[in-house]
Image (cartoon, rainbow, N blue to C red):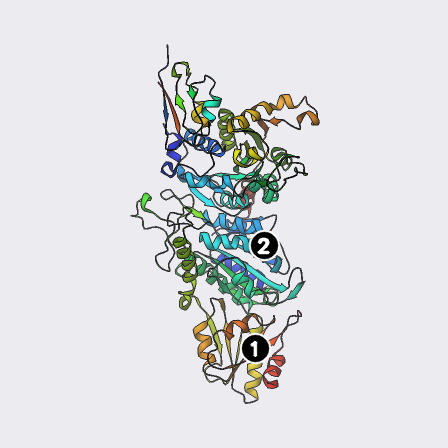
């Protein structure tokens, strides 16, 4: 058992520490700013834990290799940023359709295309949600501190294993390169979720790698299991994993892939609140903007304004219930984000209450300051 | 000693591609377009099983005793 | 003794391919070789891509991972590295293996990942209607080269050899006996092995290029076939219309897992 230690490390390094603590033992990736420290740290740390690092020729192959390793029994992760995340969409879709767990760290930077490679942004919300084609559900988590990078990594792997799905760890350059004291602990085994295995009494011929009857994925033996043969495919398939493109089955599978996440949103969604209970002015945000928002709340409170913060830790599925309760109880919300309104537009979908939505946006690679949030509130 | 050879043709699986009849080194089959092969010259068969191995449709089995 | 049927989902036949397509011949060879190895099915992993030959997993009773177009080798890399005790087979066509997936083939061979790639080369994209691929011969007619193909074809085996592949071989579907031997040697080989299988596509390539029915296409393949020994005495021009069959490369080199595992052994901290 590893001892609990405190380390002064950047978010990118804390992500690897968290992944290893969660039981991850395989990394496949392609270096890209501003995520490369994740690759470097993984290459250094994984062998110490009996794990393996492989640097692939591109992100297309990285994502495919990740899924292969996961299927053969290793909890697997990769790291990238916008342009690489675009290439990963192909096999992110394969992971969604085949229902193979994996964690993808996306340390967001300015885009589109090469954009400004070293500058922070939060422009990948929609790429995480809809980057791969076709209807499906997705889970994405967003850290706001280096400690989050560690703790939420464990959450990300747990969700990935539980729901048999790739999970996106939607960090940003600010958090990735933010150096803070991080408590590195070895989680209790009871904290770790591993993919469900078939009931030992199941006869091999009765085992089915897929189950579309409810919103819970089928058990998932490893390739190499001595009793069960495993079969996965990116083609629309039946319970046996056999190609089955009938209209009824296509309908059934895509609905299942969506419902598996959306109908379990209550169990997946994580939010945090800061002075929200009595707030009249509410900031809703995520990632690095949470830090500016907390300072803004403090300053507004000093001025006698009852400000509060709702932090979205899970970006996908969206915290619909919590957002609705805020929208229905205040006159206006302010949404700072380092893009031109990707989160604000999602929140508008829930606004059946006439709540005023104020956007504070930056997409120039510069952090949103607390004062900008306060100015945004006072200008309207 | 003469080998005892049996050839089984599964007409359900046969797609009548003509590979077996055209490439058999001993011309054991005859085949017309639109029909599966017919074994018409079993006595010349040497049991090489090339017809079985070249059948893309798993429609031929050769048994040599 | 096990037969090819023991490794197949035989009740799923008839298979999906066109009449005379050589891919069923390759499928039977793979299943027959597995039967001859006697390997436990649970210790075999088959990764297939997209394309006509990507459909082989439909008929094999093994651990199967059916992936995206061109990415079968990377997916198989993950499996081979995560569990070195598995026998990993990868089935691809020429489009999958060396056109959209060409870069992965180069790097998989270079890393010497312990797996066996079986590439069925039918000179075109059969599943989408016979468009040209990276192996389509110059001058050939395909559905997207109606005036004759202007590009030179890629030699799959030369590419794999140049990239560092440690076992490289080629067979035609005319000769299923040689095909079986080469696939078996490739499976027993430790490291990256690649077997290219020339298969006839009478529906598209054969029809467009007036090569006749399947049997005639297979005979033509056989007429073009020469041994590596014969090839060594021929000029580049003389070789242009030939198919060199047999084992082309067979050498030893530590595979990626073996080399990386030494690092793990040295760096591993006590749990």
**Image location (x, y in percent) of residue C56:** 46, 39
Q: Are marks 1 and 2 on the same chain?
A: yes
The picture quadrant where one finds residue C61 is top left
Query: Which of the marked residues, 1 or 2, is nearer the chain's N terminus?
Result: 2
Front label number (1 vs 2): 2
The residue that disc 2 covers is A87
Task: Decide: few, some or many residues near mark 2? Use Cα within 10 Å; few <14, some 14-19, many ≥20.
Answer: some
Image position of C120 with respect to A62: above or below:
above
Q: Quick check: can you spot residue A315? A: yes
Q: Secondary structure at mark 1?
A: helix
Residue A192 visible in the snapshot: no
Mark 1–mark 2 CB contact (< 8 Å) = no
Between A284 and B24, the one lying in front of the other is B24
Kindly identify which chain the residue marked by label 2 belongs to.
A
Q: Position of residue A219 (x, y in %)?
A: 37, 52
Numbered mark located on residue C11 in the image:
none
Q: Residue at x 34, y 47 (%)?
A: A207
- The C terminus of chain A sits in image quarter: bottom right
Residue nearest the viewer, comparing A291 with A353: A353
Residue at left offset 53%, top offset 67%: A143
Q: Which residue is mark 1?
A: A293
- Residue A57: percent from the left, percent from the top? 61, 48
- On the image, which quarter does residue A32 sit in? bottom right
- The residue at the far bottom in this view is A304
Locate the N terminus of chain A and report the quarter of the image it occupies. bottom left
Q: CA distance from mark 1 to mark 2?
A: 33 Å
Provide the chain ID for the residue under circle 1.
A
Q: Is residue A53 left or right of residue C1?
A: right
């Amino acid at each position: 058992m590893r001892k609990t230690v405190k380390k002064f490390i950047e978010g990118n390094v804390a992500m690897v520490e968290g992944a290893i603590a969660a039981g991850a033992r395989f990394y496949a990736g392609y270096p890209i700013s501003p995520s490369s420290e994740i690759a470097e740290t993984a290459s250094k740390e994984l062998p110490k834990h009996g794990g393996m690092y492989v640097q692939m020729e591109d992100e297309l192959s990285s994502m495919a290799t990740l899924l292969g390793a996961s299927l053969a029994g290793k909890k697997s992760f990769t790291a990238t940023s916008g342009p690489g995340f675009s290439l990963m969409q192909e096999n992110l879709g394969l992971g969604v359709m085949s229902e193979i767990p994996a964690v993808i760290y996306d340390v967001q930077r300015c885009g589109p295309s090469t954009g400004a490679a070293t500058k922070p942004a939060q422009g990948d919300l929609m790429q995480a949600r809809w980057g791969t084609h076709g209807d499906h559900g997705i889970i994405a988590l967003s850290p706001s501190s280096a400690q989050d990078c560690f703790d939420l990594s464990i959450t990300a792997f747990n969700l990935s294993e539980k729901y048999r799905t790739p999970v996106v760890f939607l960090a940003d350059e600010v958090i990735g390169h933010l150096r803070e004291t991080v408590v590195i602990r070895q989680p209790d085994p009871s904290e770790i979720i591993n993919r469900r295995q078939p009931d030992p009494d199941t006869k091999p011929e009765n085992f089915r790698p897929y189950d579309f009857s409810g919103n819970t994925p089928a058990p998932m033996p490893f390739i190499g299991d001595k009793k069960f043969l495993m079969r996965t495919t990116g083609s629309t398939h039946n319970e046996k994993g056999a190609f089955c493109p009938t209209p009824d089955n296509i309908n059934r599978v895509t609905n299942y892939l969506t419902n598996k996440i959306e109908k379990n949103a209550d169990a997946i969604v994580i939010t945090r609140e800061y002075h929200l209970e009595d707030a009249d002015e509410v900031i809703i945000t995520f990632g690095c903007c949470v830090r500016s928002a907390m300072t803004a709340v403090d300053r507004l409170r000093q001025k006698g304004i009852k400000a509060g913060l709702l932090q979205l830790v899970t970006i996908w599925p969206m915290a619909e219930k919590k957002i609705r309760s805020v929208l229905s109880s205040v006159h206006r919300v302010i949404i700072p984000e380092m893009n031109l309104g990707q989160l604000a537009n999602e929140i508008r979908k829930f606004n059946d209450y006439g709540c005023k939505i104020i956007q504070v946006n930056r997409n120039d690679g510069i952090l949103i300051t607390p004062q900008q949030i306060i100015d945004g509130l006072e200008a309207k | 000693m003469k080998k005892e050879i049996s050839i089984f043709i599964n007409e359900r699986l046969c797609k009548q591609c003509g590979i077996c009849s055209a490439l058999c080194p001993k011309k054991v089959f005859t085949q017309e377009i639109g029909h599966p092969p017919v074994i018409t010259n079993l006595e010349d068969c040497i049991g090489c099983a090339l017809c079985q191995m070249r059948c893309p449709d798993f429609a031929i089995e050769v048994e040599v005793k | 003794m096990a037969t090819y049927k023991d490794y197949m989902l035989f009740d799923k036949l008839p298979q999906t391919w066109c009449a005379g397509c050589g891919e069923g011949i390759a499928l039977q060879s793979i299943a027959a070789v597995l039967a001859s190895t006697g390997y436990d099915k649970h210790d075999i992993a088959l990764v297939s891509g997209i394309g006509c030959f990507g459909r082989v997993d439909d008929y094999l009773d093994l651990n199967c991972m059916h992936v995206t177009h061109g990415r079968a080798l990377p997916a198989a890399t993950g499996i081979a590295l995560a569990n070195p005790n598995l026998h990993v087979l990868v089935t691809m066509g020429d489009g999958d293996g060396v056109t959209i997936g060409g870069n992965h083939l180069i790097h998989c061979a270079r890393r010497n990942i312990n797996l066996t790639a079986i590439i069925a080369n039918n000179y075109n994209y059969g599943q989408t209607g016979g468009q040209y691929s990276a192996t389509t011969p110059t001058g050939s007619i395909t559905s997207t080269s109606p005036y004759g193909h202007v590009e030179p074809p890629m030699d799959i085996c030369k590419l794999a050899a140049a990239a560092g592949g440690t076992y490289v071989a080629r067979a035609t579907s005319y000769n299923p006996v040689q095909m079986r031997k080469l696939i078996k040697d490739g499976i027993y080989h430790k490291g990256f092995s690649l077997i290219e299988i020339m298969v006839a596509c009478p529906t598209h390539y054969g029809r467009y290029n007036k090569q006749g029915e399947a049997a005639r296409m297979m005979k033509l393949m056989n007429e073009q076939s020469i041994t590596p020994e014969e090839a060594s005495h021929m000029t580049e021009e003389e070789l242009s219309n030939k198919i060199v069959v047999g084992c082309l490369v067979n050498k030893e080199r530590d595979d990626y897992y073996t080399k990386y595992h030494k690092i793990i052994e040295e760096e591993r901290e006590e749990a």
